Amino acid sequence: MIKFDIVVVPPGGGEVEFSASTKGPRIPQVGEYV
């Protein structure tokens, strides 16, 4: 398992709206649902 952080920002950039640490078999790619 790989530990990684999920960081959510609004479309177009800006301030971080949400972040969370989690584990998974691989790091998610851009556009994938987690």
Image: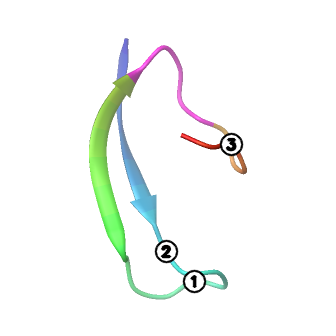
Q: Which residue is mark 1?
A: 13
Alpha-carbon span between mark 1 and mark 2:
6 Å
Q: Earlier in the sequence, mark 3 or mark 1?
A: 1
In the picture provided, is 9 more to the left or to the right than 13? left
Name the residue: 53% across, 20% down: 26
Q: Which residues are magenta?
A: 24-28
The residue lying furthest to the front in this view is 33
**Mark 2 and mark 1 in contact (Cβ < 8 Å)?**
yes
Residue 21 percent across, percent down from the top left = 27, 42
Q: Secondary structure at mark 2?
A: loop
Quarter assignment of residue 7: bottom left
Q: Is residue 6 covered in magenta?
A: no
In the picture provided, is 29 more to the left or to the right than 10? right
| Most foreground residue, 34 or 21 | 34
Residue 32, disc: 3
Alpha-carbon span between mark 2 and mark 3:
15 Å
| Local crowd size for mark 1, using a 10 Å CA cut-off: few (<14), some (14–19), many (≥20) | few
Q: Secondary structure at mark 1?
A: loop
Kind of residue at badge 1: Gly
Name the residue: 41% across, 50% down: 6
Q: Nearer the viewer, mark 3 or mark 1?
A: 3
State whether the magenta stretch is mostly helix, strand or loop: loop
Kind of residue at badge 2: Val
Q: Earlier in the sequence, mark 2 or mark 3?
A: 2
Kind of residue at badge 3: Glu
Rendered position, 12 above or below 9: below
Residue 19 percent across, percent down from the top left = 31, 59
| Local crowd size for mark 2, using a 10 Å CA cut-off: few (<14), some (14–19), many (≥20) | few
Q: Which residue is mark 2?
A: 9
Q: Secondary structure at mark 3?
A: loop
Query: What count of labels does the image hold?
Result: 3
